[in-house]
Amino acid sequence: MTKVDLNCDLGESFGNYKIGNDDAIIPLITSANIACGFHAGDENVMAQTVKLAKENGVAIGAHPGFNDLQGFGRRNLDMSPHEIYNMVVYQIGALKAFCDIQNVKMNHVKPHGALYQMGARDPKIAQAIAQAVKDVDSKIVLVGLSHSILIDEAKKLGLKTASEVFADRRYEKDGQLVSRKKEGAVIEDTDEAIAQVVRMVTENKVTAISGEDIDISADTICVHGDGAHALEFVKQIRKRLSEVNVDIVKIGG
């Protein structure tokens, strides 16, 4: 039977600002990527989200991003690889402390937003991210864009990897995600998102925004927790994958 993980970016509320629907989504996913306080989240949200994930048997991952709350970590910052290395170590360490308190292991790391995209394209940034993960804990799985430089650099360091695909994003013909600045980058229609997911998982193909079919590897499916249709996407993805005999399991499961 085909197996795939279902992950969601969570813990993105901050102070009095509530983002996403974590309480409803966490019981329906297998992996949670928890914001580490730089692009979103704070110490109270991190603590609560780790606890909630543990209670629901959901794999916990750090979701480090650029220190850019106003831009939600989706704006490129000009940082050296050494600075990026330290930034990623810092955020993984912060979330790991909350995991240790709850006596639960950190399963994976998935960069967020602009950091994720830059790591998918730039070998030096990818290497810095991968090295940070390895130096904190070499057993942690690094999640990255399918067929990206980040996956390649992580493998060179001997890290376990999980190739990620997106339910609610469109792809360029080179396998990169369409920039959010472009019209049509985000899929809002539930049926279209579900059809894309099923094809990526069962056929290892996706139709690029240019109309061409491209190859893709799907170890884990991402739904963005801040998306307007996140809860509906998660429910329908679970239902549809079950209908086509795909087993939903944790990363590394």
Image (tube, rainbow, N blue to C red):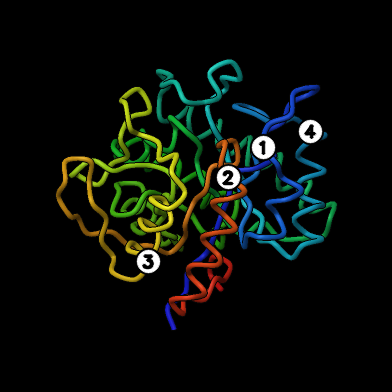
User: Disc 4 or 3, which lies upstream in sequence?
Assistant: 4
Which disc, if any, is residue 120? none
Q: Tag 4: residue type?
A: Glu
Q: Secondary structure at mark 1?
A: loop
Name the residue beneath numbered marker 4.
43
Name the residue beneath numbered marker 3.
201
Q: Nearer the viewer, residue 187 or 189?
A: 189
83 shown above or below 169: above
Q: Residues within 10 Å of mark 3 (few under 14, many from 20)?
A: many
User: Disc 1 or 4, which lies upstream in sequence?
Assistant: 1
**Left or right of 4 in this view: 122:** left
Q: Tag 2: residue type?
A: Ala
Q: Secondary structure at mark 3?
A: helix
Q: Are marks 4 and 2 in contact (CB under 8 Å)?
A: no
Q: Secondary structure at mark 4?
A: helix
User: Disc 3 or 1, which lies upstream in sequence?
Assistant: 1
176 shown above or below 7: above
Q: Tag 1: residue type?
A: Gly
Name the residue beneath numbered marker 1.
20
Q: Residues within 10 Å of mark 4 (few under 14, many from 20)?
A: some
Tell me the quadrant of the picture where the C terminus can be found: bottom right
User: Disc 1 or 2, which lies upstream in sequence?
Assistant: 1
Q: Nearer the viewer, residue 194 or 212?
A: 194
Q: CA distance from mark 4 to mark 3?
A: 35 Å
Q: CA distance from mark 1 to mark 2?
A: 8 Å
User: Disc 4 or 2, which lies upstream in sequence?
Assistant: 4
x and y, in percent, of residue 201 in the image: 37, 66
Name the residue beneath numbered marker 2.
230
x and y, in percent, of residue 19 in the image: 68, 31
Q: Are marks 1 and 2 in contact (CB under 8 Å)?
A: yes
